[in-house]
Image (cartoon, rainbow, N blue to C red):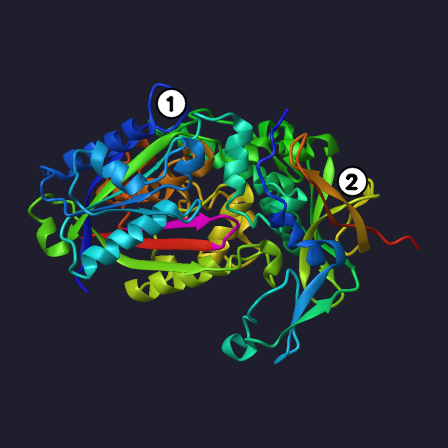
C-alpha cells in the first residue's frame, strides 16, 4: 500500500442554486479542485463520484460517465458510488484505495447532489429511500422520524435535554455564518430552534439539515508525488468503513451507531492514534441528535456525555475538540452526495491553515465522519498535515 | 390526484408478515426474527434451510417513539400520528404506528398489542394496503 495525499480541493457554494444544473455543479467543483492542485487535468487517470439519487432528484442515472463527459475527461474510468448520505465518503475511500493500491496515480473524487429541481415532498421521499422501505417507510416512518426515535431514547437513557439538542444547531449555525460557501449564514438562538415548527417529536425544523444543491471535489495522488504540486501536503493516515442493519429496529442499541464505532476503530488503528489526538472533526449532523451520537461513538466523549459537552462549549471552534467548523450539514447544507467530500475539503482547509475566521489553532490532525441513512453505512477518514 | 405505479405483487407477497406477524426462527440457535430473515446473522451458513416460519403473538412494549408532524402525502391525513419501535415479547423489535392513543399519553415502556389496520393507499386508484399497527393494552 502506498501513502496517499490530498493535493487539491474544490467546493461550490451550497444552497438553493436554481441557476445551476447537476452538470454545472460537479464540473465547477472539479475544475476548482484541479486548479487548487495545480495540475493540468491530463494527469487524471481515475474518477470516483458520490451521488445518492441523481435518478430521482434529476431523473438521471449513469452518473459516472456523465461526470467524465461534462468535465471533458472522457476515456478516463469513472465510477459512481452510492451509499445514501455516505455516498461521498465512500467514493473518497474507493479513490483512496485505488491510489494506495497502485492502480491509479491521480484521481479526482467528486460528490454532488442537485436536490431542488423537484418539489420538496419528492425530495423528502427520495431521502427516505435511505431507510428500510418495506419495514420502516411503509408504515409511515419518515427519515426525520428515525432520528427522532433515537433522540427520544437518548433522552430517556442519558437525560439529554431538548435544549442540548438545540445547542448543536446554534453552534453549527454560528460556524456556518463564518463559511462563505454555507447554505445558511445566519446565527440562531436556542429559542429559535425550540420555537421552529415541529417535524417529528422531539425534533423541530431547526434540528434538521436542509435540502441543498452543491458539489465538492478533491484530488488524490501518491504521497511521494505530492511535493511536485504543493508544499502544504495533507496525508490520509486512516480510512475506515463499516455497515449495519438497514433498519433501526433490528439493532440491540439505537443510541450508538455500531458502523461509526467500527469504521472509526479501523481508521484510528491504521493512523496509530487515539480520539484525543484529533484536533478538528467534521461529523455527520443530519439532525442535531446525530452530532451528539457521533461525538460519543467516535470516542471524543463517553456515551451519554455528548450532549453535556455541547452545552459546555467543548465542541465550539475554540473548544477542546472543535466539531463541524464548516457549519456541518445543519448550516453548511447537505447536498447528500457532496457531503462526504465537502467534509474532506473542510478538514484539508483546516490542516493547511486556510480556514480563515473558522480556523482551529494549530490543527494538525483532522477527522471526517460520514453516515448513510440511520447509520447503516459509515466512512471515517483521518488526515494529517505533513 | 396521484396515479398509482406499483403492481400488487410487491405487497401481496408480504401479506403473511404484514397481516399475521409471521416472522422466522433460526432452527440452529432458536432466535426469532421479525421482519423475517432468510439467513440467521448469528449462525450464518449453518442456518441455511433451517429458518422456520414463526408467528409472533403481537404483544410488546414501547421501546422508543416519535410524533410525526410532517408526513408523505399518503400519511398526511393522519397527522399528528405516533411512530414507535415496539419491543415484542419474543425479542424482535418492529417499527409501527401506534393507534387508539393520544400522542400526549405515549410513553416508553407502555404495553401494546397488535391491531390490524389500513396502512396506506397507492394514489387514488391504486391498491389499499393493510397491515399491523399497535395500540395500548387496556387494563
| In the image, farthest residue toward the right | B139
Q: Which residues are magenta?
A: A365-376
Residue shown at the point (30%, 65%) measured from the top left? A270
Q: Position of residue A43 (x, y in %)?
A: 10, 44
Return the residue at label 1: A17
- C-alpha separation, residue under disc 2 versus residue under disc 1: 38 Å
What secondary structure prevails in the magenta region? strand
Residue shown at the point (55%, 54%) measured from the top left? A305
Q: Position of residue B99 (x, y in %)?
A: 80, 44
Mark 1 element type: loop
Residue shown at the point (37%, 54%) measured from the top left? A380
Residue A20 in view here: yes
Density class for disc 1 (Cα within 10 Å; few <14, some 14-19, many ≥20) is some
Residue A360 in view here: no
Q: Where is A281 relative to A263, above or below?
A: above
Residue shown at the point (16%, 48%) measured from the top left? A233
Q: How many marks?
A: 2
- Is A369 magenta? The answer is yes
Q: Position of residue A283 (x, y in %)?
A: 42, 47
Density class for disc 2 (Cα within 10 Å; few <14, some 14-19, many ≥20) is some
In which chain is the residue bearing label 2?
B
Which quadrant would residue B101 be assigned to in this image?
top right
In which chain is the residue bearing label 1?
A
Residue A46 vs residue A238: left or right?
left
Q: Where is A79 relative to B46, above or below?
A: above
Which quadrant would residue B126 be assigned to in this image?
top right
Return the residue at label 2: B103
Amino acid at each position: 500500500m502506498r501513502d496517499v495525499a490530498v493535493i487539491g480541493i474544490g467546493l461550490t457554494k451550497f444552497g438553493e442554486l436554481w441557476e445551476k444544473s447537476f452538470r454545472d455543479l460537479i464540473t465547477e467543483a472539479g475544475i476548482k479542485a484541479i486548479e487548487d492542485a495545480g495540475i493540468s487535468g491530463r494527469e487524471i487517470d481515475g474518477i470516483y463520484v458520490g451521488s445518492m439519487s441523481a435518478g430521482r432528484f434529476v431523473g438521471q442515472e449513469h452518473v459516472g460517465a456523465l461526470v467524465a463527459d461534462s468535465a471533458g475527461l472522457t476515456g478516463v474510468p469513472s465510477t459512481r458510488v452510492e451509499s445514501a448520505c455516505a455516498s461521498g465518503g465512500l467514493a473518497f475511500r474507493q479513490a483512496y484505495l485505488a491510489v494506495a493500491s497502485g492502480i491509479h496515480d491521480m484521481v479526482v473524487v467528486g460528490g454532488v447532489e442537485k436536490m431542488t429541481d423537484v418539489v420538496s415532498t419528492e425530495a423528502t421521499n427520495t431521502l427516505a429511500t435511505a431507510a428500510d422501505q418495506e419495514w420502516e417507510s411503509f408504515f409511515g416512518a419518515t427519515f426525520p422520524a428515525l432520528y427522532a426515535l433515537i433522540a427520544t431514547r437518548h433522552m430517556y437513557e442519558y437525560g439529554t435535554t431538548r435544549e442540548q439538542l438545540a445547542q448543536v444547531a446554534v453552534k453549527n449555525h454560528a460556524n456556518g455564518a463564518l463559511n462563505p460557501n454555507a447554505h445558511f449564514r445566519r446565527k440562531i438562538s436556542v429559542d429559535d430552534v425550540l420555537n421552529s415548527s415541529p417535524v417529528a417529536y422531539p425534533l423541530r425544523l431547526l434540528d434538521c439539515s436542509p435540502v441543498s444543491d452543491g458539489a465538492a471535489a478533491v484530488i488524490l495522488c501518491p504521497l511521494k508525488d505530492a511535493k511536485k504540486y504543493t508544499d502544504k501536503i495533507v496525508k490520509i493516515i486512516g480510512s475506515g468503513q463499516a455497515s449495519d442493519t438497514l433498519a433501526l429496529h433490528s439493532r440491540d442499541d439505537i443510541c450508538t451507531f455500531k458502523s461509526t464505532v467500527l469504521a472509526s476503530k479501523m481508521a484510528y488503528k491504521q493512523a496509530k492514534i487515539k480520539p484525543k489526538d484529533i484536533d478538528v472533526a467534521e461529523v455527520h449532523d443530519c439532525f442535531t441528535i446525530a452530532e451528539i451520537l457521533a461525538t460519543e461513538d467516535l470516542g471524543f466523549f463517553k456515551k451519554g456525555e455528548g450532549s453535556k459537552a455541547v452545552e459546555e462549549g467543548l465542541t465550539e471552534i475554540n473548544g477542546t475538540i472543535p466539531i463541524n467548523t464548516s457549519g456541518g450539514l445543519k448550516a453548511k447544507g447537505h447536498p447528500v452526495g457532496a457531503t462526504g467530500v465537502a467534509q474532506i475539503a473542510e478538514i484539508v482547509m483546516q490542516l493547511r491553515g486556510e480556514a480563515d475566521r473558522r480556523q482551529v489553532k494549530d490543527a494538525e490532525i483532522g477527522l471526517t465522519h460520514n453516515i448513510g441513512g440511520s447509520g447503516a453505512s459509515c466512512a471515517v477518514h483521518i488526515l494529517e498535515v505533513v | 390526484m396521484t396515479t398509482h405505479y406499483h403492481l400488487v405483487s410487491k405487497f401481496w407477497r408480504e401479506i403473511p408478515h404484514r397481516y399475521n406477524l409471521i416472522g422466522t426462527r433460526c432452527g440452529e440457535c432458536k432466535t426469532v426474527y421479525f421482519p423475517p430473515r432468510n439467513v440467521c446473522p448469528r449462525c450464518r451458513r449453518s442456518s441455511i434451510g433451517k429458518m422456520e416460519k414463526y408467528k409472533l403473538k403481537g404483544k410488546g412494549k414501547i421501546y422508543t417513539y416519535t410524533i410525526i408532524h410532517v408526513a408523505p402525502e399518503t400519511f398526511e391525513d393522519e397527522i399528528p400520528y405516533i411512530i414507535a419501535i415496539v419491543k415484542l415479547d419474543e425479542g424482535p423489535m418492529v417499527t409501527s404506528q401506534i393507534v387508539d392513543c393520544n400522542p400526549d399519553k405515549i410513553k416508553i415502556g407502555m404495553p401494546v398489542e397488535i391491531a390490524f389496520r389500513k396502512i396506506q393507499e397507492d394514489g387514488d386508484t391504486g391498491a389499499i394496503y393493510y397491515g399491523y399497527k399497535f395500540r395500548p393494552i387496556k387494563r
